[in-house]
Amino acid sequence: MEEVDRVLGAKSEITNEDLANLTYTSCVFKEALRKYPPLAEFSRITDSDMSICGYQIPKGSWIQVHIIEKKPLKRVLV
């Protein structure tokens, strides 16, 4: 809160310059989004044949990526 009080004070409107000066607050938001992303997963269709951890994935396959999964990729696929 010290940073917010120092940068914003009693302003009624916040500018882009103000946001750029909220470095600690920005780090807190980025860390929260890293640990708890707004999307739990997303899907993609492969546009070419590929190999992931030794598994052959043919072109046109759906791949679902779980963002919140904290296990190494090998453990998820095995």
Image: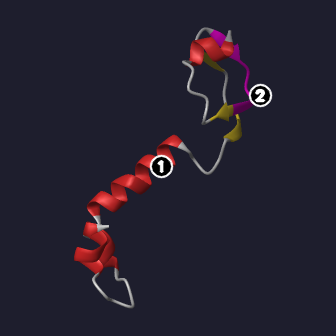
Q: Residue 32's mark?
A: 1
- In this view, the residue in front, 44 or 73, is 73
Residue picked out by circle 2: 61
Q: CA distance from mark 2 to mark 1?
A: 32 Å
Asked if the stretch drawn in magenta spans residue 33, the answer is no
Which residue is drawn at the image coordinates 57% and 20% (left, top)?
A: 71
Q: Residue 50's mark?
A: none
In the displayed structure, 34 sits above or below 50; it is below
Which residue is drawn at the image coordinates 70% and 38% (left, top)?
A: 44
- In this view, the residue in front, 19 or 78, is 19
- Mark 2: amino acid: Ser
Q: Is residue 30 left or right of residue 47?
A: left
Instruction: Give coordinates of residue 48: x percent, y percent.
Output: 66, 28
**Which residue sits furthest bottom?**
12
Instruction: Give coordinates of residue 2: x percent, y percent.
Output: 26, 68
In the rendered view of the protein, which quadrant contains the N terminus?
bottom left
In contact (CB < 8 Å): disc 2 and disc 1? no
Which residue is drawn at the image coordinates 77% and 28% (left, top)?
A: 61
Highlighted magenta segment, given as a residue range: 55-64
Examine the image and state in which quarter residue 41 appears. Answer: top right
Camera-nearest label, 2 or 1: 1
- Mark 1: amino acid: Ala
Q: Is residue 32 left or right of residue 2?
A: right
Which residue is drawn at the image coordinates 31% and 72% (left, top)?
A: 4
Q: Is residue 46 visible?
A: no
